[in-house]
Amino acid sequence: MPERQYELMDCLENGIIGAVYRIGYANSIDNKFGHEDKVIGFNNPKTRKIVFIPYGSMIRMDGLEYIVERGKLKPYEGERMFEGKGVIVNRRIFTHDQDIRCLRNNHGISSMLDFMEKKAEVIKLNDSVTARLERYFFDVAHNKLPPNGSFKDNLVRYGLLKK
């Protein structure tokens, strides 16, 4: 199964300025049958959870600074599942994967694969209300919201509403 860039619904923690994470693989449960997507993202070595670093944030690796971009959308590459008339589908059938070429610096854009297991220090988080709204509306338009969340749950998850 091909890799894809992490999305908010894959992540179990939010990034913190000054924290150091490792770039690596994580498996994201894709549907009620337990099928998994192979995701590349930022892993917290202490908690072993995948961390959401908002797109537009800045990280430092090997002394160089990179901006984490949302990877370009590409066609979904994976199994599509249907179950009888009840139509239980893999949630990714209606969306596109985000490319793992998403780390930009002065020399161009790089793939997360080029930095596997490297330490990445968060030096700036792009977590303004405007950035949260942009993420939310992009994810709504591209069917990237968690499949089991209510409208209120999703607003809380995106930091647009307090619990």
Image (cartoon, helix red, strand yellow):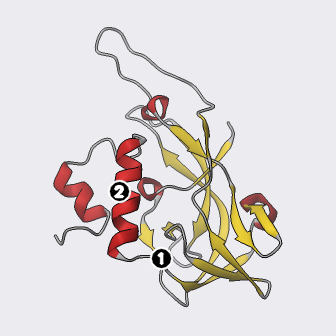
Q: Residue at x 50, y 48 (%)?
A: 28
Disc 1: which residue:
126
Q: Residues within 10 Å of mark 1 (few under 14, many from 20)?
A: some
x%, y% of residue 87?
34, 17
Q: Position of residue 24 (x, y in %)?
A: 67, 63
Q: Is residue 64 above or below residue 109?
A: below
User: Which image quarter is the C terminus in?
Assistant: bottom left
Which amino acid, by three-letter code, is at mark 2?
Tyr
Left/right of residue 86 with respect to residue 14 in the rendered view: left
Which residue bears the numbered disc 2?
136
Sequence order check, earlier mark of 1 and 2:
1
Q: Amino acid at mark 1?
A: Asn
Which circle marks residue 20 in the picture?
none
Query: Which quadrant does the N terminus fall into?
Result: top right
From the top left corner, tell me how far across and down residue 32 is, in percent: 37, 34
C-alpha gap between disc 1 and disc 2: 14 Å
Q: Find residue 25 and report its image quarter.
A: bottom right
Could you say which quadrant of the image residue 103 lies in? bottom right
In the structure shown, which secondary structural element does the residue marked by tag 2 occupy? helix
Reply above or below: 151 against 155. Answer: above
**Residue drawn where x is 67% and y is 79% of the image:** 120
In percent of width and height, residue 73 lies at 59, 44
**Which residue is located at x 51 percent, y 87 percent?**
17
